[in-house]
Protein backbone atom coordinates (compact mmCIF):
# COMPACT_ATOMS: atom_id res chain seq x y z
CA UNK A 1 0.00 0.00 0.00
CA UNK A 2 2.91 2.34 0.67
CA UNK A 3 4.11 1.95 -2.91
CA UNK A 4 0.76 3.16 -4.25
CA UNK A 5 0.73 6.08 -1.84
CA UNK A 6 4.27 7.01 -2.90
CA UNK A 7 3.31 7.02 -6.59
CA UNK A 8 0.12 8.96 -5.91
CA UNK A 9 2.03 11.56 -3.90
CA UNK A 10 4.67 11.81 -6.64
CA UNK A 11 1.95 12.27 -9.24
CA UNK A 12 0.22 15.00 -7.22
CA UNK A 13 3.51 16.73 -6.49
CA UNK A 14 4.61 16.72 -10.13
CA UNK A 15 1.25 18.05 -11.32
CA UNK A 16 1.47 20.91 -8.81
CA UNK A 17 5.15 21.68 -9.27
CA UNK A 18 5.30 21.64 -13.08
CA UNK A 19 1.81 21.37 -14.61
CA UNK A 20 2.93 21.98 -18.22
CA UNK A 21 5.38 19.07 -18.16
CA UNK A 22 2.73 16.90 -16.46
CA UNK A 23 0.20 17.59 -19.24
CA UNK A 24 2.85 16.91 -21.91
CA UNK A 25 3.72 13.61 -20.22
CA UNK A 26 0.04 12.70 -20.04
CA UNK A 27 -0.42 13.51 -23.74
CA UNK A 28 2.57 11.38 -24.72
CA UNK A 29 1.34 8.51 -22.54
CA UNK A 30 -2.10 8.66 -24.18
CA UNK A 31 -0.43 8.76 -27.60
CA UNK A 32 1.46 5.56 -26.80
CA UNK A 33 -1.70 3.84 -25.53
CA UNK A 34 -3.61 4.83 -28.67
CA UNK A 35 -0.76 3.60 -30.85
CA UNK A 36 -0.91 0.20 -29.14
CA UNK A 37 -4.71 0.12 -29.58
CA UNK A 38 -4.28 1.02 -33.26
CA UNK A 39 -1.91 -1.95 -33.59
CA UNK A 40 -4.71 -4.32 -32.54
CA UNK A 41 -7.71 -2.47 -34.03
CA UNK A 42 -6.57 -0.77 -37.25
CA UNK A 43 -9.08 2.09 -37.35
CA UNK A 44 -7.67 5.38 -38.64
CA UNK A 45 -9.30 7.33 -35.82
CA UNK A 46 -6.87 5.86 -33.29
CA UNK A 47 -3.86 6.72 -35.44
CA UNK A 48 -5.01 10.29 -36.10
CA UNK A 49 -5.74 10.89 -32.42
CA UNK A 50 -2.38 9.35 -31.47
CA UNK A 51 -0.53 11.59 -33.92
CA UNK A 52 -2.44 14.69 -32.81
CA UNK A 53 -1.46 14.02 -29.19
CA UNK A 54 2.16 13.50 -30.24
CA UNK A 55 2.30 16.64 -32.37
CA UNK A 56 0.53 18.68 -29.68
CA UNK A 57 2.93 17.54 -26.99
CA UNK A 58 5.93 18.21 -29.27
CA UNK A 59 4.80 21.73 -30.06
CA UNK A 60 4.09 22.38 -26.38
CA UNK A 61 7.56 21.15 -25.39
CA UNK A 62 9.18 23.28 -28.12
CA UNK A 63 7.35 26.41 -27.00
CA UNK A 64 8.16 25.77 -23.35
CA UNK A 65 11.85 25.27 -24.16
CA UNK A 66 11.90 28.42 -26.31
CA UNK A 67 10.45 30.50 -23.47
CA UNK A 68 12.35 29.03 -20.52
CA UNK A 69 15.58 27.25 -21.38
CA UNK A 70 16.57 24.18 -19.42
CA UNK A 71 19.88 22.26 -19.32
CA UNK A 72 18.56 19.69 -21.80
CA UNK A 73 17.00 22.25 -24.17
CA UNK A 74 18.89 21.15 -27.28
CA UNK A 75 18.05 17.47 -26.79
CA UNK A 76 14.38 18.33 -26.21
CA UNK A 77 14.23 20.46 -29.35
CA UNK A 78 15.84 17.79 -31.52
CA UNK A 79 13.51 15.13 -30.11
CA UNK A 80 10.41 17.23 -30.71
CA UNK A 81 11.38 18.03 -34.29
CA UNK A 82 12.03 14.34 -35.01
CA UNK A 83 8.67 13.40 -33.46
CA UNK A 84 6.81 16.02 -35.51
CA UNK A 85 8.49 14.96 -38.77
CA UNK A 86 7.82 11.28 -38.05
CA UNK A 87 4.19 11.96 -37.17
CA UNK A 88 3.58 13.94 -40.36
CA UNK A 89 5.31 11.26 -42.44
CA UNK A 90 3.23 8.47 -40.88
CA UNK A 91 0.03 10.46 -41.36
CA UNK A 92 0.54 11.08 -45.07
CA UNK A 93 1.91 7.67 -46.13
Image: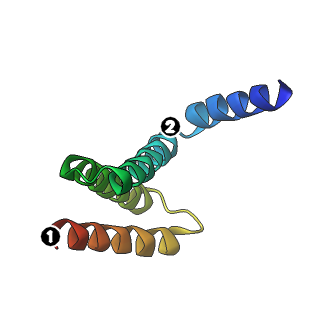
Is residue 82 visible in the rendered structure shown here? yes
Q: Which mark is residue 92?
A: 1
Q: Secondary structure at mark 1?
A: helix
Is residue 57 visible in the rendered structure shown here? no
Which residue in the structure is indicated by mark 2? 19
Q: Residue 20 location, x and y as percent?
A: 46, 42
Q: Nearer the viewer, residue 31 or 77?
A: 31
Q: Residue 61 location, x and y as percent?
A: 41, 57
Outermost residue toward the left? 92
Judge whether 26 appears above or below 12 on screen.
below
Q: Nearer the viewer, residue 88 or 12?
A: 88
Q: How is the image coloured?
A: rainbow
Q: Residue 63 location, x and y as percent?
A: 35, 57
| Left or right of residue 45, residue 22 in this image | right
**The quarter of the displayed image where residue 47 is located:** bottom left
Q: Residue at x 38, y 48 (%)?
A: 37
Amino acid sequence: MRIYRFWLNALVWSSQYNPAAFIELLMLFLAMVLLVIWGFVPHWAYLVLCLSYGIGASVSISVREAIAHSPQAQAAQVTTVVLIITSIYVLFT
